Amino acid sequence: MSISPGQTVCVTGANGFIGSYLVRDLLQAGYRVRGTVRDPKNEAKTAHLLALAEQLGAADRLELVSGDLLTPGSFDDAIAGCDAVCHTAAAVFFAARDPQKDIVDPSVQGTTNVLESARRAGTVKRFVHTSSMVAIYGWNQPKGHVFTEADWNTSSTLDVDPYGVAKVEAEKAAVAYVAALPDEERFELVHLNPGMVWGPPMIKAHAKASPKLVRDVISRSQPGVPQLMLSIVDVRDASAAHVLALTLEDPPSRCLVFAENVWMNEVMQQIQAMFPDVKMGARRIPKPFVLLASLMDEGLNTRQLNALVGRNLPMDNRRSIAAYGMTYRPMSETLRDTATPMIDNGWARVSRR
């Protein structure tokens, strides 16, 4: 049951990187949008959304309301009367003293709280959950294995990559929750699994989200980067996939969304070549030095890096192309558009040659 322009969509995490573009695209397409943020009165986090609505002549179709992932019932008002939900909000933490309590539980409980509010609303027909490629890939598969939507990440543990565990468990919890609903209360559940989301940050806070890897290279926070395989998607394409997940009659229940499989050190060197007057930390760091650095940085996991550095982990994006008709932006466009706002707006420390 597709969701048509004119209907109301709740976007959780509306001020986030993907959420902000999704709000823009939904308004542009003619939807009514109810976006959730922790504090709608915080202009630093909401002004860009209100400005977007004004520019599109859609101020009357955007409403911002509060919502807290860890507070049961806090999304009831936001979702009441909505035809669909795009759940993009997420707690993104990669390391903690208590990874179960601080990383996994918030992800699973947060998703469950939003699902509960959708059930109580009684009007939601489709629920689009923004999952991640990390719910799919793992390093315990044979070399040469190409990951598809049929795969689940079984290599991450609480000790090694609790964030991966959180994304797997949140996605599985959502499936179990909807499957347990009686027929009269059930709604469609669609998972999107984007890769590493880059593209132009709208505000400074976005430069500290997924594009932080690029920001760190521009700022030379590290002397260089490891040889890690990334599956990159432009935030504008990720948002477009969410809109398609609403409008298609019968979207697949799970879909990887990314443009290309690339080596991190190679794309960072491409960015350096685009901005030759900026000194960047784009050179490749040999694996032994990466592992040595991880021993001195609590935010890095030595065992995970040992498994991932230099390992080819290709993913298959053909379902997104066949089912969603996705046409992805060229990687060069995504790279340039990610770095340019950071340099021009001072969102990254820049040293000139």
Image (spheres, grey):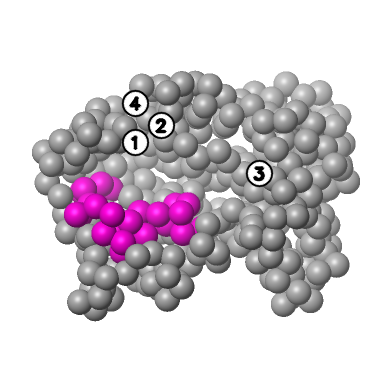
Q: Position of residue 106 (x, y in %)?
A: 59, 29
- At label 3, the amino acid type is His
Q: Is residue 311 left or right of residue 87?
A: left
Per the rendered image, the range of residues in magenta is 206-229
Residue 71 versus residue 218 in the image, above or below? above
Q: Which mark is residue 6?
A: none
Neighbour tally class for label 4: few under 14, some 14-19, many 20 plus, Cα within 10 Å = some
The residue drawn where x is 55% and y is 66% is: 202
Residues 59 and 144: in front is: 59
Mark 4: secondary structure: loop
| Residue at 22% over, 60% down | 281
Residue tagged by mark 2?
Answer: 95
> Where is mark 4, residue-wise?
160
Q: Position of residue 278 (x, y in %)?
A: 26, 73
Mark 1 vs mark 3: in front: 1
78 magenta-colored: no
Q: CA distance from mark 4 to mark 2?
A: 9 Å
76 left or right of 129 in image? right
- Which quarter of the figure has residue 80? top right
Q: Report the Cα–Cα distance between label 1 and label 3.
A: 27 Å
Give the label, 4 or 1, closer to the camera: 1
x and y percentages locating residue 309 in the rendered image: 21, 41
